[in-house]
Amino acid sequence: MKIGNFLEGKNIQVSERDESDFLTALKQGDRQAFARLVDETSTQIYRTARQILGDEQDAEDVLQETYMKALKALPTFEGRSSLSTWLHRIAVNEALMLIRKRKTPMVSVDDTQPFDSEEESTGMEIVDFCCLPENELLTSESRKFMDDAIQRLPENLKTVFVLRDLEGMSIQETSEVMQITENNVKTRLLRARLRLRQELAEYYAEKVEKEKSK
Amino acid sequence: MSEHVHTEKCNTLLGDLSDYIDGNLQAEICAQIEEHMKTCDNCRVVVNTLRKTVELYEHCNDNVELSGDVKERLFAKLDLKDYLPSPNITDANK
Ligand SMILES: [Zn+2]
């Protein structure tokens, strides 16, 4: 049983006995247990929704909807994945559904095709922005640019990137949330990272030139 | 700024770069990549900036916080208001 996963890193020691009691209480509709679950996991769920949607109000709607759904579905929760993974799956589905409802059509890349390095490397920008000082790399302007760049990714790449690189999930957890194979996760992740690298290389190019001429 | 001149070798390595920077690659392929980077500046820059990109994005989540208001509305929506942890306690736990 992996229900303790969502408490990891929070310095809360839970024995297996406590975990199984906690899950039993949750499934029986214990309000206090549910409140604890919401308290412990809502920041992660909100962040995930916010990064996928790029909008605070939408993220809040998804946050609320996620726990409403979870509350209803808990009695049938089977514990095949961790509670955290399960909640993320609900949230991601809600977020993608909301995007579909928006006016702009959802952008998706065809990933039935294997990774095509030829295609991905075309026009690749070679700017070594690693040399820039940290305070130049992380200005509020560049953070804004990074945020916007995530929003420019196609949904299926963005979701994998958010779960894996922003939420720090493993490849396996990400594949459970997305219900796709681990290889598929890896391919999407690489594509997402390469696209973002490219955007940052273009963005920092000018600063790198300035730095060189100093 | 120069365009990436990619050889066959560069292209083969590209597919493994995510695993490489995550440290999830077999030693043998890692060695191949490292050997190639010694002579190919372009690939070296791509690997380093790819790693840097992932690092920079780790800071991206710092800004996104669940505000007290959003949390309060969430607890209200779920009819859990009685269980809302007091803000002081939440702060102390951070
Ligand atoms: Zn090369």
Image (cartoon, coloured by chain):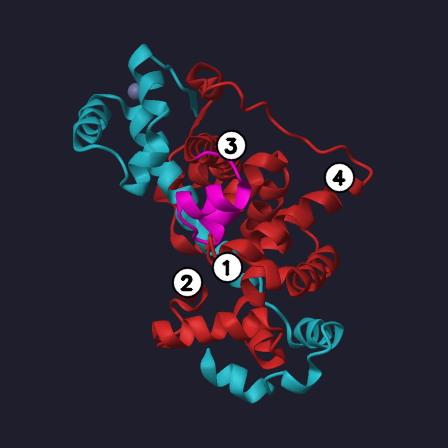
Chain colours: A red, B cyan
Q: Tell us which disc is closer to us: 2 or 4.
A: 2
Helix, strand or loop at disc 1?
helix
**Marks 1 and 2: in contact by CB < 8 Å?**
yes
Q: Are marks 2 and 4 in contact (CB under 8 Å)?
A: no
Residue stretch in magenta: A163-181
On the image, which quarter does residue B48 sit in?
Answer: top left
Tags 2 and 1 on a common chain: yes
Q: CA distance from mark 1 to mark 3?
A: 28 Å
Q: Where in the figure is residue A75, as x and y percent of width and height?
A: 61, 64
Which three-letter amino acid code belongs to the residue tagged 2? Asn
The N terminus of chain A - image quarter: bottom left
For badge 4, the amino acid type reads Arg
Q: Which residue does the numbered mark 3 point to in the structure image?
A: A195
Q: Amino acid at mark 3?
A: Arg
| Residue A147 on the magenta segment | no
Circle 3: is it few (<14), some (14-19), or many (20+) Cα within 10 Å?
Answer: many
Disc 3 residue: CB within 8 Å of ligand 1:
no
- Residue at the image position 44 percent from the left and 48 percent from the top: A173
Q: CA distance from mark 2 to mark 3?
A: 31 Å
Residue located at (41% from left, 31% from top): A183
- Which one is in front in this view, the residue at disc 3 or the one at disc 4? 4
Q: Are marks 1 and 4 in contact (CB under 8 Å)?
A: no
Callout 1, which amino acid?
A: Ser
The residue labelled by disc 2 is A5
The local secondary structure at tag 4 comes to helix
Q: Position of residue A57 (x, y in %)?
A: 75, 59
Q: Nearer the viewer, residue A100 or A90?
A: A90
Q: Are marks 3 and 4 on the same chain?
A: yes
Q: Which residue is mark 4?
A: A100
Residue A40 picture location, percent across and down: 52, 71
Q: Vertically, is A69 above or below B82?
A: above
- Between the C-alphas of marks 2 and 4, the distance is 31 Å
